[in-house]
Image (cartoon, coloured by chain):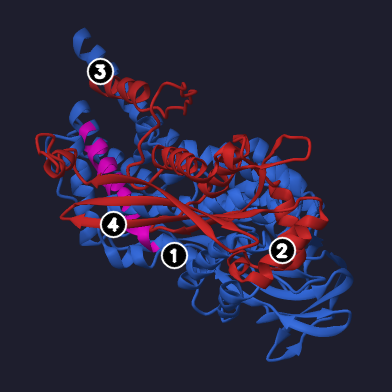
Amino acid sequence: MRNMLTVALVLSVLGCRSYQYGHVVKDNQPSMVGSHSAGSEVYDPLVDEAVAKLLGACGSPMSLEISPEGFPVARQVCFVGIENKSAEELADFKDQLYEQIDTQINRSQSFRAISRHMVDVALHETRLRPDSLFIPANRQLFADVLQQQGSPVDYLLYATLTSGTTERNSSSQRDYTLTLELVDTRSGEFTKEQAFIRKGYHRSPLGRLANYNPFTVWR
Amino acid sequence: MRTSLTLRNVRLLQLAFYSLSCLWVIGCATHAHRLALPRDQFFNNQLTAAHTSLEKVVDKARRDRSVAELDLAIIELFNGDAQTAQSRLREVRDRWEHLEQTSLAEQATGYMTDDQRLAYSGEDYEKLLVGVFLTLSDLMQGGIDAESYTLQTIKKHADLIERLQAKSPDESTIAAYRLPAIAPYLRGVLREETHRNYDDALEAYQQAIECWPHLTQLQSDIERVEHGVHSSPGNGVLYVFALVGRGPYKVETTHEVTSEALLVADQIFSALGKYSVPPTLAPVKIPAIACEPKPFEFLGVQINQLPAATTMSITDLNLLAIESFAANQTQVIARAAVRRVLKKGTVYAAKEQLEASSPVASFAMDAMGVLWEASESADTRCWGLLPREIQVARIELPAGIHQLSLEPIILGKPIASAVDVMVEVQDGANTYALSFWPGIAPVGKLLVSHR
């Protein structure tokens, strides 16, 4: 009888369902690393690096046109969208990446991003697919609509996420690349910059040590 | 003499305690009886009466609360109150998330009685359908959260598969355990409407056709998002969603305990106790899925009194329920087997404790044990106001106000008069119409989305 009571007591104390808790991650704390797919630990640095490279390559204030009043004129960029060609679904990250890239471009002195809502209206009005804007006639039509809305466009910006996977027994390495492509709407010339991150996935905690020996000298 | 009398009194008290314990844990009235009336009222288009009856169930029957609330959400949705329905669905979703964790105390009670004593955390197909109905109810109010709900449903399915793989390595069962095609389809519909994310829409439609290859319309959807656009300039798109027939429900059935289930039961015993128990088991009571046939094949859709399209099945809820139920059946049978052995073991232990060696006492305790085992009933709790099928039609229309008429069709001929509603189609945007047809006439209102 005493045993039964003890068992009942233990079950009632230990066997309850727990609640879920949350906490705010501080700025200086690293992001959580996704165990099955990429997350903010991959996408955030990809965006930062790719945008910085792009701005470094063609965002020099020295190259800007000067207005009649003597001020540099920022170039108008229309961020068309992100194409996901990686092996993983972006799910709710897609719109987040869009906003991050759009905001970082807009913060630079050399470029001014056109409002996403205006871009949506232009796509809606012209019924053009984002990938069809590479055709000069379509690009011109699209730029005309934006111009009519009061947003002349100098460049179109495309982002593409790709991945490559290397398998080794129960471990794998996935290389993520974010490519930003800036297309001049008048000439069709383009500038391309990339950021690249590699990530390993393992079925066991020892998989990391087995595949990425810290004592190996890389050349 | 006095010592002997005292000992006898103690044993009598113990016997009374065991008897009362057995009676306390005997199963209660079944869920199906409590909810039969409100569900019939709903199917007979008495939405207010059904709502009142179900609210009483929510207040009184604690263990039926979740399924009663889901039924209430359906009633509220087709009564035109999508906001309340959505809030109720969210509450059940969150509660079920919490209940997915194992409570050892509750499981122990379940083993001593039956599965109805466990807090109901929903069958896997119901968890997925909560996400689908959250999306549909949100679309009726402008769809601000609809995309999130579609993603949650797809993620939920991935989580369920992962959990199932941990329990059972049978790949064929897991492969048959499909995502309701309407979940990725709705995601495709929403991504296509952005005029920007055609790649996402393509991926979603491809996922939907993998889940439901019978929907030929999906081929044209895939073709459109690969090479075309959402709609021509000046046009919008009307999606007609129809919930057809009465959905799957659970019935009690008996089942021979399979060797696989015995193996699982044995594993549970080995984990719990020091000695193995060799049970000789009679069939156990477990739930099974039942469903009534569809009242008609599909709906004919007319726009401004001209035939425009017919709806096509995008999700068969009966099939979905059968598949997800089959994937978990071994576990259900194993629990029933463990319960049966535990009850026999308890009676045996009680006899040993009370030294009930006399034929009369032994017979009395055996009778109590038999009564205890017979009191078990299968857990037939389920979301009872689901349809058998979800059907859809996509129609591109010029922007403006149109008359939408729906009529049930069998063998190419209408079998009942059409039901009309006015819809406003917006340039470059989606409009959604939703109706529930448990029979040849719809129940409640024919809903149209508004922004």
Taking the image as drawn, is residue A146 in sight? yes
Q: Amino acid at mark 4?
A: Thr
User: Relative to B303, is A50 above or below?
Assistant: above
Q: Viewer-proximal residue, A153 or B233? A: A153
Of badges 2 and 3, the one in the foreground is 2
Of badges 1 and 2, the one in the foreground is 2
Q: Residues within 10 Å of mark 2 (few under 14, many from 20)?
A: many
Compute the Cα span from label 4 to label 3: 59 Å
User: Residue B178 bears which disc, if any?
Assistant: 1
Q: Badge 2 is on which residue?
A: A142
Q: Secondary structure at mark 4?
A: strand
Q: Which residues are magenta?
A: B326-349
Of badges 4 and 1, the one in the foreground is 4
Q: Amino acid at mark 2?
A: Phe
User: Residue A165 bears which disc, if any?
Assistant: 4
The x, y position of residue B54, in whole percent, is 70, 46
Q: Secondary structure at mark 2?
A: helix
| Colour seen for chain B | blue
Q: Residue at x 34, y 35 (%)?
A: B108
Q: Badge 3 is on which residue?
A: A2
Q: Viewer-proximal residue, B237 or A146? A: A146
